[in-house]
Image (tube, rainbow, N blue to C red):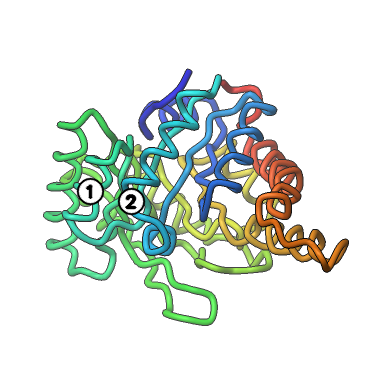
Amino acid sequence: MTHVTLRDVLQPALKGGYAVPGLVCLGWEDARAFVAAAEAERAPVILQAGPGARAHMPVSVWGAMFRHLAEGASVPVVAHLDHGTSLADCRAGLDSGFSSVMFDGSDLPLAENIDATATVAALAHAAGASCEGEIGFVGYAGGAASAGTDPEDAARFARETGVDAMAISIGNLHLQQDPGNGLDLARLRAIEALTDVALVIHGGSGVPFDQRAELSATSHIAKFNIGTELRMVFGAALRAAMARDANRFDRNAILTDTHDPMQHAAQAVFRGLGASGRA
């Protein structure tokens, strides 16, 4: 199996009691390692290009690279544009071959967020792609504070936008380097009682491993975004590669040494979410 949509992988996850990782990519090296990990684990994978990645490399290049990796893979691969903040961002992703886009209107008033997200969802669906939206606001470690998702607002958002997946704020934070105190289960269960849409946790690196595993199996959370913990592995592997021989200068040779650590770390993520053996 090759290039698929977000809905294609999240609906089976909801029914099967597991979650699929949305793995944050910053270049060829990590994207390739993540697909290798998915194949080793026989798991579906979501490759994500966020605003930082798109600022570093054009969205059209990301789309072509993700499609190339998907077409050569034997497991389902979703090419996902993460945190698009405008219709133009999402349209560019769809035009570049992404099979899924996330519109982030979380800083908008509720009605505006619903209207804008519904427009993007309709555009994505017309293109044969999927759409993720966000209700509430997921903050940043050491930065902007979160605003927790209101369950009634979440129900209205899911109903009126037609999104395939809904990112929620229940104590999760972007860019958290260590597992935090865990997610707000009471808020999660209140949201689940009012909607059956696939739920997404951004800032999954900050969620304790045991809670990730439990919620993947027992909740509507079908996607955990994982970035920071894998970037930390990449940085450590790169520093170790340079330290082994300070005279090395060929970037391809040096970067090759990051592949195995990144693949093994990603494989642990798949296993922790119960995604292994699902492809």
The quadrant the C terminus occupies is top right
Residue 68 percent coordinates (x, y): 45, 31
Q: Position of residue 37 (x, y in %)?
A: 66, 35
Q: Is residue 3 above or below residue 78?
A: above
Give above or below for 42 relative to 174. Answer: above
The front one of 207 and 39 is 39
Earlier residue among tags 1 and 2: 2
Residue 273, quarter of picture: top right
Q: Is residue 132 left or right of residue 215?
A: left
Place of residue 253 in the rendered image (x, y in percent of width and height, measured from the top left):
72, 50
Identify the disc placed on residue 117: none
Measured Cα–Cα span from mark 1 to mark 2: 7 Å
Task: Residue 241: name its quadrant.
Answer: bottom right
The residue under label 1 is 92
Do residues under tags 1 and 2 come within 8 Å of each other at their CB atoms? yes
Mark 2 lies on a secondary structure that is: helix
Amino acid under disc 1 = Ala
Category of crowding for the residue at label 2, using alpha-carbon neighbours closer than 10 angstroms: few (below 14), some (14–19), many (at least 20): many
Secondary structure of the residue carrying numbered label 1: helix
- Is 140 left or right of 193, judged from the image as shown? right
For disc 2, the marked residue is 59
What amino acid type should be assigned to the residue bearing mark 2?
Val
Residue at x 11% of width, y 54% of height = 115
Q: Give the side of residue 180 with respect to residue 163, left or right.
A: right
Quadrant of residue 187 in the image? bottom left
